[in-house]
Image (cartoon, rainbow, N blue to C red):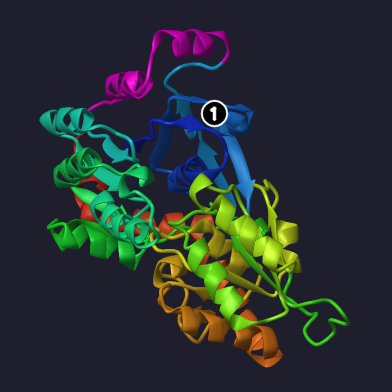
Amino acid sequence: MVHSRRIRALYPNFFGDNLIAYVALRILLYFNGPDIRADVMGICSEDSVRDFKKKKRRETHSSGSDHRAFRVYRDAIPPGIIWSIARRIFKGESLERFAEFRFLASLRPGDLVYAWPSASVWLYRKLKERGYTVVSERINTLVMSSKRILDAEYEAIGLPPASHGLTTGAVDDELACMNLSDYIFSPSPAVTESIVTAGIPRTKVLESSYGLRDTEILPPRVDFGERGDKPVTAIFVGSVCVRKGIHLLLEAWDRSGVTAKLTVIGRVSPEVADMLAAAMSKNPNITHHDFMSDLKPVYAAADFFILPSLEEGSPLVTYLALGASLPLLVSPMGAGGVIEDGKEGMVIDPHDIDGFAQAIKLLVSDESIRRRMSAASGAKAPAYTWDKVALRRLEALKGACPGHFDPKAKR
């Protein structure tokens, strides 16, 4: 009898079907198959995760494939009244540590452990003491790298570096966890570079990507050249903060002198609020909207996407731009390892303000370039649906840990 191999993931966070929890749920969902059972444990969850708790569910893709998966998500603390009590009893990181105790107790010999951010050094050490193979997920560049980038940027614009919240303690803890990992999933070349630069062997890195739902691949664009009086519109989507390069975008937009529309979508960090308000006051074509749960109309109405990020992993908003067949004007970090300069868009150093300004002018004025890049963007999107992304990741795991997936191996 062939027994199922288990991949047990922990992301000690509160789960909703959004942000990084959404990513974890999709990857674990599509890891499941006839001889593999995969799930993820979080601290607790909201209603949007309910379907992922079911013992069986079916998901059909536009490609025609019919995917069956067993329970994908487990709560460390059941929701409802028990969750309410737990929040009163536990303080600070205690909830995360309680989830780690529950997770550790749920493991059995032979499980492959998949640790997501916030898992502690204590847990990694316990896992290694007990002989588990541990695979880590890094969603951004290592803290050592992101802290260096943000220290320099905050100082350059006159903000106290410590205000970005990244500490030397966080650097040390993450490096300890990465050194205890057997393998590390990296979603982009920038993340890989940060891992290797930190002195971690390149052989530990499993290069991958993130993705999008097939329902987020919108119909091809057909409105080029039929705009009437509608202005060309660029969109910035994400946290409106220094890390995402909003200050650099506003300067480049002003320098470009275009009369096009810039729509900024996302929650505004306090350190850039005055800067954004001043830009909108000066230029009425710059508008801001807070966080939106449904971004499809925003992407569908845009002409190109712009993201001059200073630090990223592989931003989900970039994949959504591919799905909407948008040309992309991005930094190397904003490209997330999936955008090729001159093909789906333009990849420019975020500090090259003149370069960004010229690219903005070109994308606004040249409809033929937008059309060409739009076609390339839309053509690439289907390769990054979550089922395909998870399959590539699973193949990487099988290559790295063949013994774990050998049906003849003893459990």
Question: Seen in the image, is 166 located left or right of residue 124?
Answer: right
Q: Is residue 264 visible?
A: yes
Q: Nearer the viewer, residue 269 or 104?
A: 269
Residue 300 in the image: x percent, y percent? 74, 66
Q: Nearer the viewer, residue 218 or 259?
A: 259
Specify the quadrant of the image occupied by residue 171.
top left
Q: Residue furthest right?
A: 228
Specify the quadrant of the image occupied by residue 313.
bottom left
Seen at 57% across and 80% down, the residue is 255
Seen at 51% across and 32% down, the residue is 15
Seen at 78% across and 80% down, the residue is 222
Please, what secondary structure does the residue beneath circle 1 have? helix
Which segment is the magenta one? 80-109
Is residue 403 inside the magenta stretch?
A: no
Is residue 91 inside the magenta stretch?
A: yes
Q: Residue flagged by tag 1: what amino acid is it?
A: Lys
Alpha-carbon neighbours of circle 1 within 10 Å: few (<14), some, or many (≥20)? some
Residue 160 in the image: x percent, y percent? 34, 48
Q: Nearer the viewer, residue 374 or 87?
A: 87
Magenta residues, dominant SS class = helix
Question: Seen in the image, is 156 located left or right of residue 199?
Answer: right
Q: Nearer the viewer, residue 325 or 276?
A: 276
What residue is pinned by disc 1?
Answer: 53
Residue 301 in the image: x percent, y percent? 76, 67
